[in-house]
Image (spheres, rainbow, N blue to C red):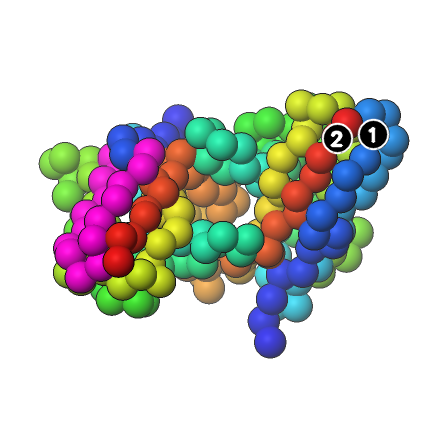
């Protein structure tokens, strides 16, 4: 069974500082990996995704993530955080088209607070 | 505008009073799914559907029903709600098959409180 671990429940950074949110996954085959962001009172918006190829993927809002198969990780990074990045971030793993429809298994989320 | 629309956005009800949360998407997606979000637990899948008249249980289906009579609609039914179903519910949809990118498109959520 697939699973996702986000070890940091809360993270606080200063505006302008760099950010890294951790994500570890468990999946028996090549995973489809995603990062979603949830702003207060909103649904989830896709930041970026990895299926194959280049292990460093670029997303919206200046975010990037790196897939490291040897570490089963897919950490999200941003070089300079803006106050508007304060939100909850979810990492997810999916089976893609090969199984279970498009079920995504989500981590428990990391709440990001940005100090001005 | 491509979107997933849920109604109601907010609902307070009492134990045992049947309710339905509607979900509609305008992207002609085959796949639709319901998740519930609870603090510290992330999002957990309730039910999903890979096409009209095809539905299946997710990880936490107890106490819920769904139907898929039309491609665009996927209502979530709570026949006899209980307080442990107090949660934030999300409907999501995506393409299937060769056009599938695995990305789920989410509605804005429905916050349900059962007293």
Name the residue tied to disc 2. Answer: B114
Which numbered disc covers residue B69? none
When the figure is inspected, residue A15 is found, relative to residue B113, above or below; the finding is below
Does residue B41 appear left or right of residue A26 in this picture?
right
Tell me the SS state at disc 1.
loop
Q: Is residue A18 magenta?
A: yes
In the image, residue A5 lies at what x, y percent? 31, 31
Query: Is residue B80 among what the camera can see?
Result: no
Which picture quadrant has residue A30? Answer: top left
Q: Is residue A48 magenta?
A: no
When the figure is inspected, residue A22 is found, relative to residue B4, above or below; the finding is above
> How many callouts does the rendering have?
2
Q: CA distance from mark 1 to mark 2?
A: 5 Å
Query: Is residue B59 among what the camera can see?
Result: yes
Of the pair B109 and A57, the residue shown nearer to us: B109
Q: Residue furthest bottom?
A: B1
Name the residue tied to disc 1. Answer: B14
Residue bounds of the magenta highlight: A9-24
Indicate the chain on which mark 1 is placed.
Answer: B
Tell me which residue sits at (23%, 40%) in the image: A22
In the image, residue B57 lies at what x, y percent? 63, 32
Tell me which residue sits at (44%, 29%) in the image: B40
Badges 1 and 2, same chain: yes
Which picture quadrant has residue B111? Answer: top right
In the image, residue A68 lies at what x, y percent? 15, 43
Does residue B103 appear left or right of residue B11 in this picture?
left
Residue density around tag 1, few if under 14, some if 14–19, many if 20 or more, within 10 Å: some
Which badge, 1 or 2, comes first in the chain's sequence?
Answer: 1
Indicate the chain on which mark 2 is placed.
Answer: B
């Amino acid at each position: 069974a697939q699973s996702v671990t986000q070890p940091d429940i809360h993270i606080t950074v200063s505006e302008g500082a760099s950010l890294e949110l951790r994500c570890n996954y468990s999946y028996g085959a090549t995973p489809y990996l995603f990062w979603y962001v949830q702003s207060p009172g909103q649904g989830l918006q896709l930041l970026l995704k990895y299926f194959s190829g280049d292990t460093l993927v670029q997303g919206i809002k200046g975010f990037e993530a790196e897939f490291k198969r040897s570490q089963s990780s897919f950490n999200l990074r941003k070089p300079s955080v803006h106050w508007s990045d304060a939100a909850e971030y979810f990492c997810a793993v999916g089976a893609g088209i090969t199984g279970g429809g498009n079920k995504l298994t989500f981590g428990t989320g990391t709440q990001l607070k940005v100090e001005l | 505008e491509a979107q997933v629309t849920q109604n109601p956005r907010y609902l307070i009800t009492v134990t045992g009073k049947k309710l339905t949360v509607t979900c509609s998407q305008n992207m002609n997606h085959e796949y639709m799914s319901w998740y519930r979000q609870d603090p510290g637990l992330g999002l957990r899948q309730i039910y999903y559907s890979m096409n009209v008249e095809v539905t299946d249980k997710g990880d936490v289906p107890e106490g819920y029903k769904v139907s898929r009579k039309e491609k665009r609609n996927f209502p979530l039914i709570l026949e006899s709600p209980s307080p442990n179903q107090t949660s934030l519910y999300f409907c999501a949809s995506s393409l299937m098959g060769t056009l599938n990118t695995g990305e789920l498109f989410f509605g804005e959520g429905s916050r349900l409180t059962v007293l």
